[in-house]
Every structure is written in structure tokens, then in C-alpha cells.
Image: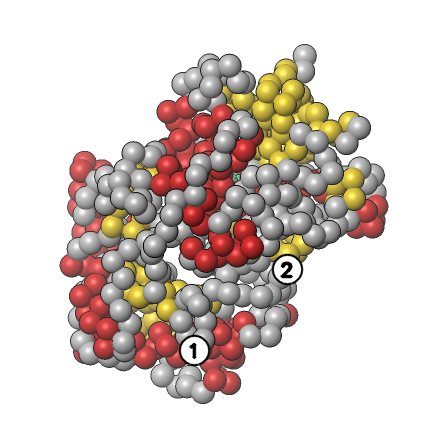
Amino acid sequence: MERTFDFIIVGAGSSGAVLAARLSEDPAISVLLLEAGGSDRHPLQLMPLAFPRVALGNVGTWQFLSEPEPALNGRTLGIPRGKTLGGTSSINAMIAVRGNRRDFDDWAAQGLAGWSFSEVLTYFKRLESHWRGETSWHGGNGPVGISRMEGADLLWEPLLAAAEATGIPYCEDPNGAEQDGISRMESTVAKGRRTSSARAYLHPAMKRPNLTVETGALVTRIAVENDRATAVQYERGGQSQSARASSEIVLCAGAYGSPQILMLSGIGDPDELSALDIEPVHELPGVGRDLADHPVVINEWELKQDRGLTRHLRFDRAAKAAAQWFTGGKGPFAYTGTSANIFLRSTEGIDRPDMQMMCLPLSGDARMWVPGLQRRSPPRISVRTGYLPLKSRGWVKLRSTDPRDAPRIFLNMFSAPGDMEGMVRSIHITRNIYQQSPLAELISHEVLPGEAVKSDAQLEEFVRANATHRAHPGCSCRMGTDEGAVTDAQLRVRGIEGLRVVDASIMPALPRGNPNLPCMMIGEKAADLMLGREPPAPIPLP
Ligand SMILES: Cc1cc2nc3c(=O)[nH]c(=O)nc-3n(C[C@H](O)[C@H](O)[C@H](O)COP(=O)(O)OP(=O)(O)OC[C@H]3O[C@@H](n4cnc5c(N)ncnc54)[C@H](O)[C@@H]3O)c2cc1C
């Protein structure tokens, strides 16, 4: 017997879990949430410093692979995504950044009513319980706990002094009036534990009788009748199942999953669909196009002394730190591993930062070691140097008609003019900061790119050989008012009734920062849109 719900949501990630929780606050509304992954009970998911092991492991993740990237010497890049309750918010690095306020104003300026920063700020505030409490910029009572990373192991003081020596100002709140400057890292961590969208929103909501959550449910197709989305087909426990939506179906399957499901359902470029013997149901050539992700390279230095977080990874110390974290949510394992954010303008004449440095008091690939048995991880510090206003765009396409096949993902990094130059410029700036006192005195030598790599041409070679993406995919079902847009400003799929996309794929351009909070904001705003609520009044900004 096919069951019917008011709303069916596909994907319990950063946006989907928020949306499911908000819609089901009204007991009269029935919601089915379908998630391909399982529960978020991985023992390390909650431990902030364990995030790389979780993200790159095989429990609770999809591990996709990109197509060969021409500008990166033909390399294919690993692409981790969350496949669990909370989606990628359950495996990410927990950096809490909203993006630059002008990024959202740009969305609105493209004709997307309701998306200016002063209009979406209500939702950013609504979602958070910020360590600063309720202020004009922050929320004090939302589900997502946000804390600031502090402690001697983070080497914040020498980093701040070095940054200030190059003229970079201290920024008290990178999610406040202006991003520019160096700020202590703020994270989606509360009481030392990760606050994913599942922990924050879904687990409390799952007690409601009107919210049905099915894990292990791989959605294979949306059924469309007379230009209206009516039902969701999925596989669960080896069986094909189907559920009907009396009101709406919402794709929250992420920047790869949502376009994949649309195309499997016959919504996309008719030529590409026909080539795979999929009957086109609705022509929407923008599906899967305009995929964007931020590029990043790692700068790394070895320290003269055993400082930073690496020393806590020696087995005996790690055991102590794990116990400290488990019992009180404190100690080195409660750190996310990033200590500071630096947003700056790498060039004159721009109105907002074009570069983000995420500073780490350890190497990105530091490992726990057992003395006498394994090689110790050397004491290092590193920066993930990112260039933000990228213009390069790639695509997501179907590999086959089998929904279990990973989609084809082409990031097409550094294909647009200016992106490579911006990245090279950013590496010079990062280096310059780490050459300043008192940070310079802590460093024995540069590991990456390495002291021999100096000129722009050498740095470009370094980028081609080493750059990767920041796991911030978006824009693959972008909102817009043009023919290439997939969704409108209400997040409705253009030309199909009863179908929306609510996740990172609707972004017209990536915000300058990290997309988890923006995705949660999108989930919050979508709930209001779907329930037909009056939009909140814009918050006046200084
Ligand atoms: C390693 C890593 C580190 C990151 N670090 C940060 C960070 O520090 N800060 C930050 O802001 N952002 C970070 N991000 C990015 C951020 O977490 C994501 O941009 C955000 O979580 C995306 O949210 P979403 O709702 O679009 O998709 P997701 O959260 O990925 O949710 C999509 C959900 O849909 C499910 N799904 C997909 N296909 C199907 C299907 N066919 N059927 C059923 N379910 C399906 C998936 O399993 C998943 O649960 C990081 C990402 C990664 C991978």
C-alpha cells in the first residue's frame, strides 16, 4: 500500500534535517524524511578533532571521485560527503561562517527576492545558540550551538601578532558587520561535541508522531504526472518502495544528489537524458550545470619545538585526551583542529575579502602514533589557503541510469581567467604572514610549498600538482530568473508543480566562507516559504 504524506523530504543533511524539523513542528502536517545513509551513531562523529578520520572513512560517507581535472595535471580528486543523519554536517570540519553579507545582497540583486543579507539574517539568528548570546547579529536560543576555539595549544597569540605585523586587523566577529581580518575560529560545537543538523534539529523532532524518518532509503526517482511531482520511489532493505506527497516533494540531497535525482526522473537536458535512454519528462538544461567549489592549497611549516596539537596524538596522551573529552567535553579532542580564520583582500579595489586562510595548529594529515611502533607525526602548523570569488564552473552528470552509481562530477577548477592568479597571490600572502615575528621564530622550516618554490610560475606548478576543492559544492540547481536556472527564488523547480530543491545546489554563487551555516539557513527559510508564512521583516544593518 502506497502511503501518503503532506511533505516528502529527500536527504537528511544540513538543509534537509532543518526543514523536516521545522515543518513537523505543526502536528497537523505529516512529513516523511528519506535518507540514504544510516543513523549518526559513529563513535567518532561527535569528537571534533576526529573529523578527518570520520570524513575520509567509509562509515557514514559517500566517497565520490571527480573526473580528471585538466588544470590539475589531469588528477582526479576524492570527494567525501555525509551519508548519515545530518548529512555532511555530521562529517564536516565544523567551521561556523555565514559568508560575506554582500554575497547574499548579490543574490537579491539578481532578482531573487527575499535573499538579501538583511532578509536572511533572521534565519541565521534563528538557527544558532551563539556563545555571545542574543545580539543584533546573533541568536541566543537556536538549536545549533556555536562556540569559539580557545586554548594555548592553538598558538593563537603568535599568529595574531604575525598577522597584525603585516597590517591585518583583528576581527572580533567574522559573522558580524565585516569579515575582514583575523579572528579566532568559531565552530558548530557545543559542550565539546559536534552540533550537526541531526543532533540540533532532527533527534528532538524524531519523537513527533507526524515525522517519519526512514534511513537506508535510496531515492531513485520522482514520479511526475501532468507536470506535477506526485510520488517518490526509493529502495530500502533491497525492496522498491514508493510514497506519495499530497502537498510537496523536496530534494535536499546535496549539490551532487539533488541534480542526480532530477536527471534520473527525466528532468534536465533532453539530449543528455535521451543519450542514456531516459525519457525526458521536463526540459531543464541547467540541472547539474554551474557546479562550483572553492579551491584550496595547504601551506605547512615544521616547528622547532613540540607545540600545537600534534603532541596530543601520541598514543598515551591521546588516550588521556579521549577520556577527558568523553567525560567532560573538554581538552585537546574538543578542538576542531582549526584555530583562526583570516579573511582578507589580496588585491586593491574590491569590496570584500577574496581570500580565506584557515589556520591549523597541526598538519592536516597528522596521525596518532604509538612510540616504538609507528613514526611520530612531526610538530607542524598549517594553513588551508582558499581563494573565494572563483569564476570556474563544472558540472554533475549521470554516469548511468543506475541510481546506485555515483554521479560524474567535473569541478573544472581554475578554468576561468583569474582563478589561478588569485590562488597564487593568496599563497604569497599566507607565506608572508608566517614569515613574521613572533611566529617565524617558532618555525624551523617550510614544508609546503617548500622553500625552493618561489616564483609565480613555480607556485602555479605547485597549485596544479597539489590544489584540491574545499568540499563546498553548490550551484548545481541554482536559483535564478534566467533560462539556465533550475529553481526560482521560492526554491521551486521551474515548470514542475509540487517540487522544490532545498540545499547547497540552489545557491546562485557560493558565499565567501563555509557553506554549512548557509545550508541550514536555507532549510530554515524554506520552511517559512513552504508554510506560506509572512517573510520576516529585514533587519536594519549598520
Ligand atoms: C570534509 C568536509 C569538511 C567540511 N567542512 C566544513 C566546515 O568546516 N564548515 C562548513 O560550513 N562547511 C563544511 N563543509 C561543507 C558543508 O558541510 C556542506 O556544504 C553542507 O553540509 C551541505 O549541505 P546540504 O544540505 O547541501 O547537503 P548534505 O548535508 O550533504 O545532505 C545531503 C543528504 O542527502 C542524502 N542523499 C543524497 N542522495 C540521496 C538519495 N538518492 N536518496 C536519499 N538520500 C540521499 C545524503 O546521504 C545526505 O545525508 C565540509 C564538507 C566536507 C565534506
Residue 354 lies in quadrant: bottom left
Q: Please, is residue 430 above or below residue 32 in the view?
A: below
For marks 1 and 2 on the same chain, the one whose residue lies earlier in the sequence: 1
Could you say where residue 412 lies in the image, as x and y percent from the top left? 62, 64
Residue 161 lies in quadrant: bottom left
Badge number at residue 401: none
Q: Residues within 10 Å of mark 1 (few under 14, many from 20)?
A: few
Residue at image location 56% in from the left, 45% down from the top = 113
Look at the numbered disc 1 and say if its residue's Cβ is closer than 8 Å to ligand 1.
no
Q: Residues within 10 Å of mark 2 (few under 14, many from 20)?
A: some
Look at the numbered disc 2 and say if its residue's Cβ is closer than 8 Å to ligand 1.
no
Indicate the amino acid at tag 1. Answer: Glu
**Looking at the image, is mark 1 or mark 2 nearer the viewer?**
1
Could you say where residue 266 lies in the image, as x and y percent from the top left? 76, 39
Could you say where residue 228 lies in the image, as x and y percent from the top left? 73, 29
- Number of numbered labels in the structure image: 2
Residue sitting nearer the eye, 264 or 121: 121
Indicate the amino acid at tag 2. Answer: Gly
C-alpha distance separating marks 1 and 2: 28 Å
Residue sitting nearer the eye, 122 or 505: 122
Q: Pick out the residue farthest to the top.
A: 1
Badge number at residue 394: 2
Residue sitting nearer the eye, 337 or 377: 337
Residue at image location 51% in from the left, 29% down from the top = 533
Q: Please, is residue 321 above or below residue 13 in the view?
A: below
Whether residue 301 can be seen here? yes
- What residue is pinned by disc 1? 348
Image quarter where the C terminus lies is bottom left
Quick check: marks 1 and 2 in contact, CB under 8 Å? Answer: no
Identify the element where label 2 is drawn: strand
